[in-house]
Amino acid sequence: MPIESNSVFHVPVLAKEVISQLEPKSSGCYLDSTIGGGGHARLILDASFPDGRLYGIDQDEEAIRAASHALKPYGSRVRLRQGNFRAVREIYKKSTFDGILLDLGVSSHQLNTPGRGFSCDRDGPLDMRMDRRNALQAAHLLATLSETDLAMAFRDFGETHFSRQIAKAIITQRAKAPVRTTTELAEIVRKAVPLRRERKSVVQVFQALRIMVNDELGALSKGLKELFSMLLPGGRMVVICFHSLDDRIVKNYFAELADPCICPPDLPVCGCGRIPQAKVLTRKPVRPSRAEIESNPRSRPALLRVVERLDLRKA
């Protein structure tokens, strides 16, 4: 039976859709590869009652502590480890799963904790590390990258149209004093862009720095392959993205799994011998309902995609 939880670490986004797509069963073993506070995990465990098992990973030690507390009533059905999902094979060795969830982005807890430096709305150090065992912080990037490299980062990872202006403003400011806090950085960005684009530009710059500090795109590109390799035939992988950079990587990887042929388009018969590994179940990404967005505004940009691993033994 479902177990009540009072955890407010993070509100699980697209919760009903995740369970609908994963279809948890009592005999199944599932992986939540970004477990956060355990919100999605709890729902998976409830849906797979009484014997479904849940493995969890998160690189944030605070998330692991929160999930451990929230999921303690489920006892031996739960197994948690700290680490990045890109290293899932090292963490869970030869384990295989009937379903895998990857919920990307920043948790509400991380955004709401000033000391973590993720939010442009709260004064705190420019940290932005999801795994605080790592040395690199956002402040170091702002202090050491050249104007050209900063502009490229804001353009490529933040997708802002004002990357050059922002980079120049940061270089000008750091010549006077180091940029060390979130409020200092936000103010620099606001002054460097048109008034109507202030808020969006600040968010984009924070996104770019967070992606670089945590190597998010590199982790995703490698992690998707590692996760899929541990998915059992007939199993499903559900991925939730919150910006276009992540979603593009996921969409392209899923498309490659479903149609891996690399033959020239004018070749009448496939000669590469590559066969489909999966079936894409979401032609377009699933988005939050209006009701969910109203109750949890942070869910607005969420995009959910699903792929099912084919059973090649039946081919």
Image (cartoon, grey):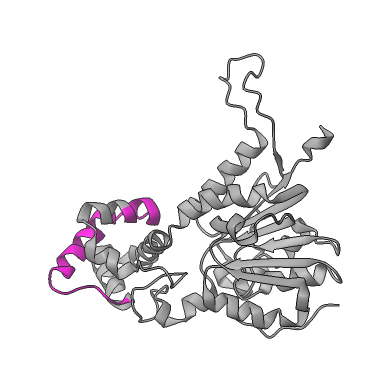
Q: What is the residue that sits farthest to the left in this orientation?
A: 176
Up-down: is 41 above or below 113? above
Q: Residue at x 59, y 80 (%)?
A: 65
Predominant secondary structure in magenta?
helix
88 vs 49: above or below: above
| Residue 239: % across, % down | 63, 56
Residue 74 in view, yes or no? yes
Looking at the image, which residue is at 16% across and 74% down?
Answer: 177
Above or below, 25 relative to 122: above
Tell me if residue 208 comes above or below residue 116 in the rendering. above
Position of residue 184 in the picture relative to residue 90 (left or right)? left
Front-lying residue, 56 or 14: 56
Is residue 157 located in the magenta-colored stretch of the structure?
A: yes
The question of residue 63 being in magenta is answered with: no
Q: For the magenta stretch, what is the residue range?
A: 153-181
From the viewer's perspective, is 299 left or right of 200? right
- Count of number-bearing discs: 0
Q: Pick whichever, 43 or 294, lies toward us.
A: 43
Which residue occupies the foreground of this view, 62 or 253?
62
Quarter of the C terminus within the rendering: top right
| Percent position of residue 193, x then y | 27, 62
Whether residue 240 is visible = no
Q: Residue at x 72, y 82 (%)?
A: 72
Q: Is residue 45 left or right of residue 83?
A: right
